[in-house]
Amino acid sequence: MGRRGDSSARPVKEDEKSMKPLIKCISAPETKRGLCCLSAVVVAGLMAGLAFDLRAADAAKLIQLDATSPGRVFEGVGALSAGASTRLLPDYPEPQRGPILDFLFKPRFGAGFQHLKVEIGSGENSTCGSEPSHVVTREELANPQPRGYEFWLMAEARKRNPQIILDCLPWAYPHWVGDPFSPESADWFVAFLETARKHYGLELGRQSRALSGPAHEQALHARSGHQIRNLVSH
């Protein structure tokens, strides 16, 4: 009999009893041989798959070039002004501010951006700050205001590069808009385009639809897209 405190005298637990047949089975010679065979089959399968992938990668690929096809056009490198990221730039005094804008947008000089996308301000905290809306209330649809600095920035960019692509999108919407895909949203979009045209003589080539949250970037909804096109054309 073991002495008190001797580990050899401790009772055997039920889970240890249940493990003994499994340990005995794994220790059996026939089981070891089976595991070795299974491992060999798995390794052989992996090697065969790898060899197939390598052969596929080494196979000759035919790339057809059609000089008559317009294909996809590389439209250049662009920048995004949103989330109050450009807030301090309008406050720079001259002559320092002009050269900064030259480095950003002047062709073949500095960054030379060919595409500028700006946020349509909504008064909400969109990331690093809040940008004011051109239409704060529904009543202001009758007379939208060029608030903020994004209109100014687009105008400065176009002065330096008349061919620059101008784009806009919202991170949020004023409370009165409600559903981002509603007729009110279309009116709010159109008011931004009309404000850019009326106060700065700007024509924007593109517009995007965005939602705050997980679905940040979404394709423009068909219904409001048709509404916007109809409103702009009148």
Image (cartoon, rainbow, N blue to C red):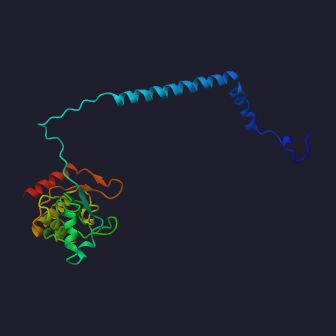
Give the camera-side residue of 179 and 219. Answer: 219
Q: Please state the horizontal and vertical placement of residue 104, each as a whole percent of the image.
A: 22, 64
> In terms of image quadrants, where is residue 110?
bottom left
For residue 209, above or below residue 149: above
Q: Is residue 24 left or right of residue 206?
A: right
Instruction: Tell me if residue 229 can be seen.
Output: yes
Q: Please state the horizontal and vertical placement of residue 89, each as a whole percent of the image.
A: 25, 72
> In terms of image quadrants, where is residue 87?
bottom left
For residue 106, above or below residue 2: below
Instruction: Tell me if residue 135 can be seen.
Output: no
> In terms of image quadrants, where is residue 79?
bottom left
For residue 87, above or below residue 183: below
Q: Please state the horizontal and vertical placement of residue 221, each as a whole percent of the image.
A: 22, 50
Q: Please state the horizontal and vertical placement of residue 1, each as a whole percent of the image.
A: 92, 39
For residue 2, above or below residue 44: below
Residue found 74% across the figure and 32% down from its top: 20
Outermost residue toward the front? 109
